[in-house]
Structure formats: C-alpha cells, structure tokens
Image: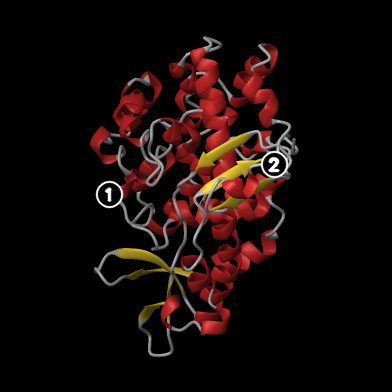
Amino acid sequence: MGRLDKGYDAVDSFHRILHGDHRPEWLRDYILTDAMRRHDGVSTQCGMNWSPLFNYWFFYTSLEHQIGTANIVWYFTHDKRATLAALFHDIAAPAFKHVVDLMCGDYKKQESTESRTAEFIRSSKEIYDLLERDQIALDDVVDYKKYPIADNEMPRLSADRLEYTFSYGIISGDLALDYILSLYSHLIVVKNEDLRNELAFSDKQSAHRYVDVAGQFWLTWYSAKNRGIMRCIADCLTAAIRNKIFEFDDLWKLSEFEIAEQMEHHRLSSWLRFQEVRAVVESDDTCSYETAPWKFTYRAPSKPRWTDPLFINEHGDAVRISSVLANGANPIADFLKYEPREYVFLL
C-alpha cells in the first residue's frame, strides 16, 4: 500500500499558489461544517491508494480537492456563489468516489452521485444557516456547471479539471510546485468559441507545457491498471454490502479507512485477493490469458479525461492548442488514438 499519511505542507503550499494573495477567508466557516469535513476521509484517487500497484506520496482528500477548486474559482472571479458551488461540487461524493458510480452502472460519465448535491446541502443545517447568513440562495450553489470557470464540457479547461491535474502531479511526484506556479501564473480568463468565460493560457508555450505533462496523466487515468483496479474495488464494496459488513448508505457516512478496516476485519475474500494483485494486463479476448492465474477478469469501460486548452496567439486571438500542435509532438492526438482493450485481467 502506498503512503497514506497527510501531506499538509505540500497541500498548504499548493493551495497558496491557487488563491495567491486573495485567500477566501470567508470560506472557512463552510469548510468546517460536518458535511464538508466528512470528505477528509475520502481520497481523490477512488481507492487506488489501497492497492500495492500505486505509490502516491500522500493521501490527497476530496475535501482538499474541493477547497483547491474553490480557491481557483475565487482567484479568477471573486464570485462568492460560483466559489461556493465549486466548494460543494463533490459534497455528495461517497467514499471511493467514482468507484460507486461504477457500482451504479455509470461507467462513462461518472456523475451518478452528483444529483444528490442539493440534498446534501439542504440536509446540513450548518451550511443552510451560513447561506441564509450570507443571503445566498441554495439554487445558486447546487450546480457548479452554471459557472463555466468552475466546470464546463470536456475538453475545455475548468477549475475542477485544472485542480485535479495539478494535485495528481503532486501526489504522484511528477510535478514540482514551482512548475505548477509557472503554469498557473500564465492563466487568464477569455471568451471561448461560445462567448463563455473559460480559463486560458496567455501564451502558446505555457499551453504546450501543460498538455505535455497532463497528457501523461490522461493515459494513466485511462489505463488498464486504473480501470481494472476501480472495477475490482467496486466488486469488493458490492460483496461487503451483500455480506452485511456495512450498508450501501454507509459509503456516505464512513471514511475509506473505516470501510477498509471493516473489510479486513471480516476477512472479505475479494478484498484480501485485491490486495494481493501485482499486475494488470489487457486483451481483446479471454483466450490470451486462459492459463494465467488471474484473480479478476473484467470488461472495463471508463471515462476518458483530457483537455484542449485555449491560448492567446500572436494575433491576440484565443485558439485551441490542438490546432497548432505538430503531429510528432501531440499529446492530445496520442491520447485520442489510444484504444483500450476490451478485457482487463488482474493477476
């Protein structure tokens, strides 16, 4: 298992970059509510921290991701409603996050739990009282898709996409904070093709540097290893619920640490086998590995995640980086031509 300690210093330094000199102190009361603090026990990595195949530097939480996303939105908009919508965008996420979307059959969009955002905010008296105090309507903060700086359609750049790309780079050890700062300092807000606000890079070089790094992550997130491990954890949670180790609703009440501890305490066979997995391979058919001692076999569709950011060209126009990338050095084209195999085997 990878390191599961807290990288407080790294997270604090990262968030300082995101909010700059404009730290939203007013957001603190919302962050300290029980509904938000629950996410301190939920990882952004959908349970992959629990597999020996991954070695993240620390346990980056869903709470930290939501705060980071809110910091970006506040930095570029100073809009309290948009910032709160960004803070709450994963408030309805359960432990193991998108793994539960797979349990619900939502392989492609991975948004099945987002419909409960209003329910979770409304059920929190602390948050409801704070919204009334600040004279902010519930409808203004339940859907961050209303605010294009916070979220928009893929492959456009948004605060959510930017935050999880940067934070993944930190916990995987692939991005240094000074590199993140060098990219972040070249971000501006422009009007995109639909005349909506969108984050963009102020120059071609910065946009190219961003996709060069992010392109490596897109392939990792869409890899057989990630898809297979998420499907496997989904099976483990389903088995635990079937064996009455905990209930489905407990995924919104317990931390990942508590859930993992219960599965280990009850010696759940699929969870024990999952922790023994040492390799993941993929194939277009099952015949290729008929003699292999695999522990799990899956058809594993998933959600591709990628970005085609805007930048300002020499004429002062906002254009997509994909329009100027050479064929020989094009992370976007490399990702889009990748075709995952149908079967994933965990050995």
CA neighbours of label 2 inside 10 A, class few (<14), some (14 to 19), many (20+): few
Q: Which mark is residue 193?
A: none
Label of residue 146 in the image:
1
Which residue is situated farthest in the bottom direction here?
A: 315
Please tell me which residue is depicted at 34% across the width and 23% down the height of the picture: 129
Q: Is residue 246 above or below residue 64?
A: above
How dense is the environment of label 1, judged by Cα within 10 Å: few (below 14), some, or many (20 and up)?
some
Task: Identify the residue at horizontal 68%, vertical 14% (top origin).
Answer: 267
Residue under numbered circle 2: 292
Does dot 1 land on a helix, a strand or a loop?
helix
Q: Amino acid at mark 1?
A: Lys
Q: Is residue 169 above or below residue 187?
A: above
N-terminal-most mark, 1 or 2: 1
263 or 129, nearer to the observer? 263
Relative to 118, residue 70 above or below = below
Q: Real-space Cα distance between discs 1 and 2?
A: 49 Å
Q: Nearer the viewer, mark 1 or mark 2?
A: 2
Horizontal and vertical percent position of residue 27: 46, 38
Task: For the N terminus, give its image quadrant.
Answer: top right
Location of residue 132 by image quarter = top left
- Residue 5 drawn above or below residue 284: above
Left or right of 125 in this view: 293: right
Tell me the amino acid under the disc marked 2. Ala
Locate the C terminus by quadrant.
top right
Residue 19 on image: x %, y %: 53, 53
